[in-house]
Amino acid sequence: MKICLCGKGGTGKSTVTVLLAHAFKRCGKEPIVLDADESNASLFWMLGFQLPPLPLMDLVGGKKDVQQKMIARFSKGEDEPAMSIWQMEKITSRSIPPDYVAAKNGFKLVTTGKIHHALEGCACPMGVVTREFLKKFETARDEIMLVDMEAGIEHFGRGVEAAVDGVVSVVEPSLESFSLAQKVMRLTQSAGAAYYGAVLNKIASAEHRHQVINRLTDLSVAVIGVIGFNEAIQSACLEGKPLDDEIARAETEEILKILASDSQRKSG
């Protein structure tokens, strides 16, 4: 099963990704986290890794090589969602070279790549690598892949969502976040993928919870879970420490129940 987490910048996609990874691990699953956000550099230490693995971008020849391949395919009339960059026909967690997957404490981490220098050009090659990796990746029976996507909705133009089993929006209490969640829902459905609903994050009060749920309900966006504003999360992020397994445990376990029932219903 592959689940993509989307949302506007600052909603806490990485935080929710890590909390759900802990929850899946407690349920006996083997979480594989794909860091597909080219700008956020916090995910690896949130999961307890000292360093991130080498990027998948390097595994396929580097950004310049991928750009050249894309240009050659564009010249042949290929659309970006149809491009093939990877030589491997099938990818599993065992077939990824060890330097490109970090493993610790029951978690595995893979990363597409990051923007490290000024004037690198657009992030399109990273989106292509992410999409094809997800399309070719096959999870084992007990594995669950959680994809921490880049902020916004640009990745929908590359067909990333068509390569996963379902999409979850991460929403904070802001009008922009509500609007983007509705757009993510519509784009996901138009791509033929399953939209599971929204996880509310950084909810500071019962009043905020009520207001946000009402706004999303008006937009026909289902709410599958709520994670309150949490000082333990804030402290960990300030100090650069891993997120504790017990943070938001009850909330994430409720989300998993909904995800499991929803995925079974939509695949049935």
Image (spheres, rainbow, N blue to C red):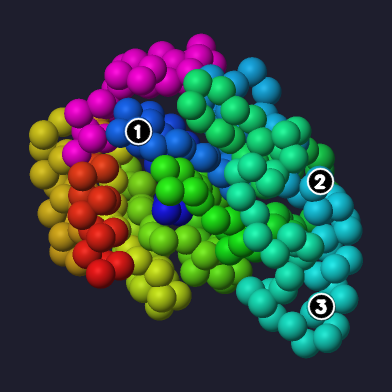
The residue lying at 64 percent from left, 18 percent from top is: 50
Residue 73's disc number: 3
Q: CA distance from mark 2 to mark 1?
A: 32 Å
Foreground: disc 3 or disc 1: 1
Q: Is residue 266 above or below residue 197?
A: below
Magenta range is: 229-254
The quadrant of the rendering that contains the C terminus is bottom left
State yes or no: residue 46 in magenta: no
Q: Quadrant of residue 226 in the image?
A: top left
- Return the disc, 2 or 1, that comes first in the chain's sequence: 1
Q: Is residue 95 left or right of residue 108?
A: right
Asked whether the residues under the numbered discs 2 and 1 touch, taking CB atoms below 8 Å apart as contact, a structural biologist would say: no
Mark before the other along the chain sequence, 3 or 2: 2
Please give the residue where the numbered disc 1 appears in the rendered image. 28
> On the image, numbered disc 2 is attached to which residue?
58
> Distance of mark 3 from mark 2, alpha carbons?
20 Å
> Is residue 203 visible in this depiction of the protein?
no
Q: Label 3 amino acid? A: Arg
- Residue 166 percent coordinates (x, y): 38, 60
35, above or below 127, in the image: above
